[in-house]
Image (cartoon, grey):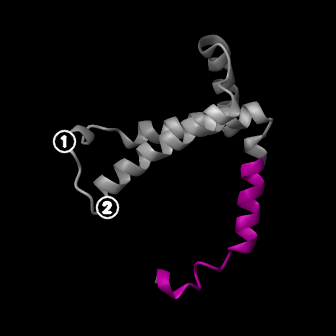
Amino acid sequence: MNIENAQQEVDNWIKEHGVRYFNELTNMAQLTEEVGEVARIIARRYGEQSEKESDKNKDLGEELADVLFVVLCLANQTGVDLQKAFDERMYKKGKRDHDRHHNNEKLK
């Protein structure tokens, strides 16, 4: 599925099940909350913090999908064509960073 289709699928879900989009500020707060849940899993599972028993069954993929869902909501409600924006960003990164990381001694 491409990003354009994902945006449409989220919009369809909102219209069918969600009644309407939360306002942009509410969705921004929701995005922050979801990113926090991802950070908690990463910090405890891959970082130096110990993982609580209650956190061991949390699914990183599900939490990342929650982040993506809210990002798609924000794109939809603000009129952003995320497919176009992503494609343009990848093009810019490809030109700007083509050799940058290969020449970074810290990454060798």
Looking at the rendered structure, the kind of residue marked 1 is: Glu
Q: Is residue 97 left or right of residue 34?
A: right
In which image quadrant can residue 83 be found?
top right
Residue displayed at 42% across by 51% down:
39
Where disc 1 sits, the SS reads helix
Query: Is residue 68 at least partly visible in the picture?
Result: no
Residue displayed at 49% across by 45% down:
35
Q: Main secondary structure of the magenta part?
A: helix
Where disc 2 sits, the SS reads loop
Please report the bounds of the magenta region as a residue range. 85-107
Task: Kindly report the distance in space between the C-alpha atoms of the residues bearing marks 1 and 2.
Answer: 16 Å
Q: Which residue is the site of mark 1?
A: 53
Image quarter where the N terminus lies is top right
- Label 2 packing within 10 angstroms: few (<14), some (14-19), many (20+): few
Looking at the rendered structure, the kind of residue marked 2 is: Gly
Up the image or down, 43 lies above or below 4; here it is below
Residue displayed at 80% across by 35% down:
79
Q: Which residue is the site of mark 2?
A: 47
Does the segment drawn in magenta span residue 25? no
Specify the farthest residue to the left: 53
Residue displayed at 31% across by 61% down:
47
The x, y position of residue 72, in whole percent, is: 65, 35
